[in-house]
Amino acid sequence: MKINFTDEQKAIIESHGDIKINAVAGSGKTTTLIEYARSRPGSSKILYLAFNKSVRLEAQKRFVAEGLAGVTVETAHSLAYKRIVYRHGYRLKNNGYKTHEIVALLGLNSQGEKHGQYVVANHINRFIAYFCNSPAEKIRELNYADVVADEKARAFVERFYGYIEKQTRLLLAKMNRGEIEIPHDFYLKKFQLSRPELPYDYILFDEGQDASPAMLDVFLRQKATKVIVGDSHQQIYGWRHAVNSLEQTDFITLPLSNSFRFGPEIAFLARGILDWKSHIRDHTPVKISGRDPSPGGRSRAILARGNLGLLVRAIDYITEHRQTGGLYFEGNINSYTYADDGASLYDILNLYNGNRARIRDKLISEMKGLDDLEEYVKKTDDVQLGLMIDIVREYGNEIPGILARIKEKHVADGDKDKADVIFSTVHRCKGMEYDTVELVNDFISESRIKKLLADTSKSIDPARLIEEVNILYVAVTRTRHLLSIPESLLPEVYPRSDAIRVIAKSLTDKKDKRKNIYGEKKEQHRTVRERRRGAYQRWTKEQDMELTVMHRTGKSMAEMAERLERSKGAIWARIQKLGLEEW
C-alpha cells in the first residue's frame, strides 16, 4: 500500500548528512526511518539502534516485512555483548549484585553507622551504574554525590565519600579482571572505552531522548552518516543517568509534529500538560497536531506513575468488577512485587510480622522492623523499597490473598490481547499504545508543581520535576481513542470532548494522600495507623450489612474504607469472608 508521506516526513527521507529528528508521540517515526533506509543507495550498510530488546525484535520484523532484511538491527547492549563478553570470556550477573553480596565481596564495615555496610554497598552499586553509563574514562572524573537527590542520602555519601569511591574502584577492578561476574552495564562501558569503529554507512539511533551517555559517545565517534530520533518530552529515564541526546548534538533538526495515533483533542491536552514546564524553566510551546485515528480495537489500559498506585487501582478494579475476565500486567507480573535490589514484598511483610525465619533477603533480615528499614531507605534514597513499605503498611497481612487473586486473573503473555484490561506503569509501557487509557491519580499535577516551587524551605531539582511532567505526557499519549483522566491532572484549559472523560475529584481525592516523588507521606501514615487500630476489631452485623450494601452498589475500596474506618486490607478480607466476590 502506497503511503502518502507528510512534508515533514519527505524532508527527512530526502535529507543528507547528520540529522536529528524531534518526533512527537505517535508520529510514525519508524515508518519514516524505514522509508529513509529504503531511499539510500542499495549497497549501503545501515545499522538501526533500538532502545531495548522488545523494540529491536519488533523493528526487525518491520524491516524484513518491508523488504529491507539487509538493515542490521541491534541494541547498544547487543553490540557491546558481541564485542566484549565473547572476546574476554566474562561471566554475566544478569540481575546485578544485591547489596549483601557486595558487602561480602568487599568485606565492608559499618563505618560506625547503623547498617552502614549495607548503605555503603547500596551506594557502590549506584556509583558503578553512574560510571558505566557515563562517557568518563576514570571513576575519579565523576562526583557521585552530585547525582544523589535526597538530602539525607547525600549527607551520608559526602561523609563517607572516600571509602565509597575506593570500594567502588575495587569492585570494578574485580569485574575487569574477570574474578567475578559482570552486570550488563559493565560490558557496555568496556565497549565504549575500547573506542569501537562500526562498519556502517548510516546509523539510525532511536529513542535518543533516553540515550546512555556511554552509547551516545560511541555513536558520535562514528564516521557514518548519523540520524538520531526521539522526543525531547519523552525523556523519563534520568534516574538511570540517561541523557537527552537531541540536546547533546548540533545536527540539523527536523520535526515530526503530526501524530497519527490520536486526534486533535488529545494533542491539545498533551500540549497543555507540557506547558507546565514554563513554571519550572524557560519553555517553548510544543507543536503537536493530532489526526483522527482509524477505527481501533478493544484494548484498554490502566496506567500509573508507580507500582503502589497501580497495585491499589488493581485491587479497586477487581473489587468493583466482580465478573471481570483476564488481567494483564505489562512486563513480568512478579517484577511488581520486587525491588531492584531483590527484596520482595513478602520479605517486608515477614519483617512487619516478625517472621524472621521466612525472610529470604539478607539485607531485610538484618532490620529490626519497618522503622529500621525506613531509616535505611532515607540514607540510600531507595524509592522502590520505600513504596513497598507503604504497601505493607496499607494492606498488611491481606497482601498474599490480594496478590493471589490478581495472579489468578492474569493471562499469559501470548494472550495479552484477550485481557479485559492491561495494567502498567508508564516506564513499562513506553512505546505502547492502547485504544482506551485510564490514568491513576498518582502523577504530578500543575498545582503540586506550583506548591513545590513556592516552598523555599525545600531544595527542588528542576530536572526531576521536568521528568515528572514528561511521565504524565507519555501516559496521556498512549491512548488512541479515549482517555479517562483524574480532574486534578488536567490543565486549567483543556478540550471538552468525547475523547476525554474526566474522573471527578470526589472519586479520586481520597486516594491522593500517597507518597509523592518528594517523600511526603506523614499524613498518609497517620491516617493508615488510625484505620489499622480498628482494622481487626470484631465486625458487627450492622457493619457487615453496610459493607454488603456498599459493595453491591459499586462503591470503591477507598470509599468503603473511609466510611467504615478500616484499612483497605481489612475491607478486602471481610469481602472475601462474606463471599461478596461471588455475588
Image: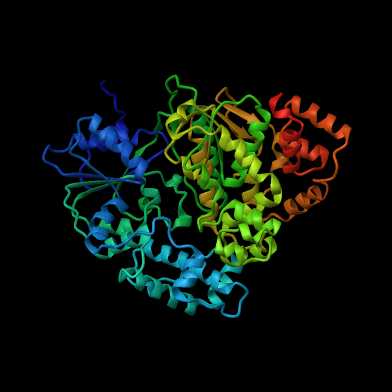
Q: Position of residue 115 (x, y in %)?
A: 60, 72
The relative height of residue 570 versus residue 245 in the rendered view (above or below) is above
Q: Give the residue displayed 51% in from the left and 50% down from the top.
A: 467
Examine the rendering and report whether any part of residue 196 can be seen.
Answer: yes
Q: Give the residue displayed 25% in from the left and 34% down from the top.
A: 63
The relative height of residue 452 versus residue 497 in the rendered view (above or below) is below
Q: Quadrant of residue 350?
A: bottom right
Q: Is residue 350 left or right of residue 305?
A: right
Q: Give the residue displayed 34% in from the left and 64% down from the top.
A: 135
In which quadrant of the rendered image does the N terminus lie?
top left
Q: Is residue 399 left or right of residue 257?
A: right
In which quadrant of the rendered image does the C terminus lie?
top right
Residue 246 or 200: which is nearer the viewer?
200
Q: Is residue 201 left or right of residue 421?
A: left
Q: Give the residue displayed 40% in from the left and 52% down from the top.
A: 244
Residue 233 or 536: which is nearer the viewer?
536
Extreme-left residue of the structure: 43
Q: How many marks?
A: 0
Colour scheme in use: rainbow
Residue 561 or 409: which is nearer the viewer?
409
The relative height of residue 126 versus residue 323 in the rendered view (above or below) is below
Q: Position of residue 330 (x, y in %)?
A: 48, 39
Q: Position of residue 286 (x, y in %)?
A: 46, 40
Residue 521 or 81: which is nearer the viewer?
81
Extreme-front residue of the structure: 357
Examine the rendering and report whether any part of residue 491 can be seen.
Answer: no
Q: Position of residue 578 (x, y in %)?
A: 77, 31
